[in-house]
Image (cartoon, rainbow, N blue to C red):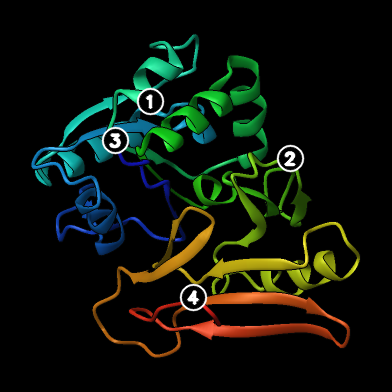
Amino acid sequence: MSTPIRRILATSAGFVDAGIQQQVRLGATVLRGLALTGKTRPRACLVYTATGDADMYYALSYEAFNAAGCDVTQLRLFPQPSADPEERLCGSDFVWVGGGSVANLLAVWALHGVGDAMRAAWEKGVVLGGVSAGSVCWHIGGTTDSFGNELRPVTNGLAFLPYANGVHYDAEAQRRPLMRELMMNGTLPELAYATDNGIGILYEGLEPTEILSDHTDGDPQRGAYVVRRTADGIDEARLAPGSDPRGV
């Protein structure tokens, strides 16, 4: 039996406007993750711990994933787990983690053993994905507004991916300079990957393999980035949507 491919989809993306008020549809980033499951009707599990399991986000997402041909379920942790975490996650083909407070997410996941369950699912070949907090969580850490309007570091991520992660890189002015500062002073690792809004990075194992985009306007400014601390400071290279980031 072949070893399952471990895949993570880390994004500042996921949903796009459906053209109708209070409705969204899945963007190209999530659709690519679903396609990688190899299933005609993937079992998708939604995990919205970062917003305290807000009903509105589940409702919008259920509709979008159903419209994309998925069987949808969820793992709620408020006020108590809705299912055994490992059983629910390992029984899925695709897991989507929503945005919100990554600090709260990591604390609640630790309490209920969700990190270990996520690792078991990842190693089984379940595609793990998420946006914002649902992107940072797979890494060693990154920048977050979990503690207030002024961004601060988070460094207790699951570390499935041994890098720092920057989200909303083009949309929030504090993100890029704080990431660089934290990398320079050693708070965050010397290698990071970041995404502009609407952009995602697909990892296979520990290696980024695809840069994905939910945008259809061909904006050349939006992309992902590989950020490195060097002896001379910070080096940053843009990764265009559709490009192969390996070896950059």
Q: Earlier in the sequence, mark 2 or mark 4?
A: 2
Total marks in image: 4
Residue 243 vertical placement versus 146 (above, below): below
Q: Earlier in the sequence, mark 4 or mark 3?
A: 3
Q: Earlier in the sequence, mark 4 or mark 1?
A: 1
Amino acid type at circle 3 is Met
Q: Earlier in the sequence, mark 2 or mark 3?
A: 3
Find numbered disc 2 in the image and state the secondary structure of the residue it sits on: loop
Q: Are marks 2 and 4 in contact (CB under 8 Å)?
A: no
Q: Are marks 3 and 1 in contact (CB under 8 Å)?
A: no
Give the number of the mark in front: 2 or 3: 3
How far, Cα to Cα, is label 4 from label 1? 29 Å
| 57 left or right, relative to 49 | left
**In the picture, residue 31 is in which quadrant?**
bottom left
Find numbered disc 4 in the image and state the secondary structure of the residue it sits on: loop
Amino acid type at circle 4 is Arg
Q: Residue at x 42, y 64 (%)?
A: 200
Residue 220's spot in the image, x, y percent? 39, 90
**Residue behind mark 2:** 156
**Residue behind mark 4:** 246
Amino acid type at circle 2 is Asn
Residue 146 visible in the displayed image: yes
Give the number of the mark in front: 3 or 1: 3
How far, Cα to Cα, is label 4 from label 3? 27 Å
How far, Cα to Cα, is label 2 from label 4? 26 Å
**Residue behind mark 1:** 89
